Image (cartoon, helix red, strand yellow):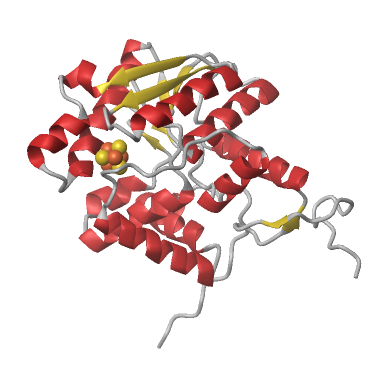
Amino acid sequence: MAPKLCTRCQTAKAALKRPKTQEQVCRECFFTAFEEEVHQTIVQNKLFKHGERVAIAASGGKDSTVLAHIMTTLNARHGYGLDLFLLSIDEGITGYRDDSLETVKRNEQQYGIPLTVVSYKQLYGWTMDEIVAQIGTKNNCTFCGVFRRQALDRGAVLCAANKIATGHNADDVAETVLLNILRGDVPRLGRCASIITGEDSPLPRVKPFKYAYEKEIVLYAYYKKLDYFSTECIYAPFAARGFAREFIKDLEAARPLAIIDVIRSAEDFTFGPLAPPAPAGTAQQPSQPSQP
Ligand code: SF4
């Protein structure tokens, strides 16, 4: 039987099925499509201005590693004119953050962009390990998330950044939408799908991967052989988000565009009839008929 050809170039052998669009594509066409979709997300949503200094929030994990790689690539390819640097937060979690920071240090060399590390110890006088020793292992992410957010802001201000780019992907955004629905948190539901937050503040945050599927980020990192750290934080168990994550994965298995649809539901909720155009790489699907 003749090998299946890539549906895009029609010449190379198809190497994978895109999780987002279900297209059978070769590796090169996958890289091109993925990069182009992130570029379109950046351009259509005016995420950056020429000359801005941008902190890439870097944890050493797959999302931020792919983000650093793509931002460096697109900045050079399309002449964004951005001054990029990696900004890492050291929460002081032995066996997790110390190892992942080693990955970020290698990324600094691999992508040729400088790295700044800001630690909880330096900012707050406590490491997460010391906090957990005092308060126990419950609700650690609640404390750590607040500290981390503030630490990123403080680190970015120290480095005179104009913006922070984070690796939040489509799955993360859809999970947050779902959690806010489950909590009945209407004000957050209206905000959580925004691609830019703090737009009027001196330090907005942007999500270039808002429409990028987690599975495609993993495939991109795998095929590009990117150097990332995949161990979970030892304090990670986060019941509500874990449940939402599983639910989103089930929806995706039944209908791959469900992730985008959940995001668009929150966008429509926020923007009403002025919702932004459909994200790059997704065709508008007809609505399912409603159940009687
Ligand atoms: Fe902090 Fe929770 Fe993230 Fe671990 S998983 S670094 S405790 S926010």
Residue at the far front: name it. Answer: 95
Query: Does the rendering let one see residue 206?
Result: yes
Ligand 1 image position (quadrant): top left
Rendering coords of residue 106 (x, y %): 53, 22
- Quadrant of the drawing holding the C terminus: bottom left
Looking at the picture, how far across and down is residue 129, in whole percent? 20, 32
- On screen, residue 29 versus residue 149, left or right, reads right
Q: Would you say 286 lies left or right of 85 here?
A: right
User: Relative to the observer, which residue lies in front, 266 or 234?
Assistant: 234
Q: Is residue 140 above or below residue 72?
A: below
- The image position of residue 220, as x and y in percent, is 62, 43
Quadrant location, the N terminus: bottom right
In front of the other: 228 or 149: 228
Residue 111 sits in quarter: top right
Position above or below: 190 against 17: above
Q: Give the residue at x 49% y 30%.
A: 47
Q: Residue 290 versus residue 13: which sits nearer the camera?
A: 13
In the rendered image, is residue 180 in sight? no
Q: Is residue 101 left or right of residue 215?
A: left
Write the residue at 31% across / 25% down. Answer: 90
Count of number-bearing discs: 0
Which residue is at 56% across, 17% downward?
Answer: 109
